[in-house]
Amino acid sequence: MDSPCGKDIGKIKDLVFDMKTSKIQYAVFSFDPSWFSSEKLFAFALTAFQARGDSDNLTLNVDKGMLASMKNFDADKWGSLNDLNRAAFINPVPTMSTSK
């Protein structure tokens, strides 16, 4: 998984499915330890990831400064991922601010 600058930032650890609809609800993402603690995971909708050209790599539009405001959870608390209140821990699609 790459940042918009092409730097490796981490990987998708798991995909969470809704068994009733057979659809992916969100991806569980683990940032590289140089970005954020490897013990913290982040949930993102699949729409947060973009394909880069014809590459197999995906891009997540984040920078290190954005991580402090993002929702995360501990790697040992996967049980809460089945909570019906999923919106409480799924991060919105990140957008990078542009400065002129």
Image (cartoon, helix red, strand yellow):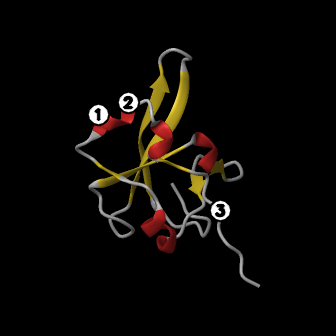
In this rendered view, identify the residue nearer to me: 43 or 30: 43
In percent of width and height, residue 98 lies at: 71, 76
Residue 23, by quadrant, is: top right
Amino acid type assigned to the residue bearing label 2 in the image = Asn
Q: Compute the Cα span from label 2 to label 1.
A: 6 Å
Residues at circles 2 and 1 in contact by the CB criterion of under 8 Å: yes
Task: Identify the residue at image location x=43%, y=68%.
Answer: 68
Tell which of 7 and 87 is nearer to you: 87
Residue drawn at 56 percent across, 17 percent down = 21
**For the residue marked with disc 1, what is the amino acid?**
Gly
Judging from the image, what secondary structure is the residue with disc 1 in? Answer: helix
- Pointer 2 residue: 82
Residue pushed farthest bottom?
Answer: 100
Give the amino acid type for the residue marked by disc 3 in the picture.
Answer: Thr
Badge 3: few (under 14), some or many (20 or more) residues near its Cα, within 10 Å?
Answer: few
Q: Is residue 97 left or right of residue 25?
A: right
Question: Which of the two discs, 2 and 3, sits closer to the camera?
Answer: 2
- Compared to residue 97, the image places residue 95 above or below, namely above
Of callouts 2 and 3, the N-terminal one:
2
Q: Is residue 55 left or right of residue 16?
A: right
Q: Is residue 76 left or right of residue 21?
A: left
**Percent x, y of residue 31:** 40, 58
Expressed as whole percent of the image width and height from the top left, the position of residue 82 reads: 38, 30
In the displayed structure, 18 sits above or below 96; it is: above
Q: Is residue 83 above or below residue 36?
A: above
Q: Which residue is mark 3?
A: 95
Instruction: Read off the residue under disc 1.
Output: 79
At x 53% / y 32%, what residue is drawn? 25
Q: Nearer the viewer, residue 39 or 1?
A: 39
Total count of labels: 3
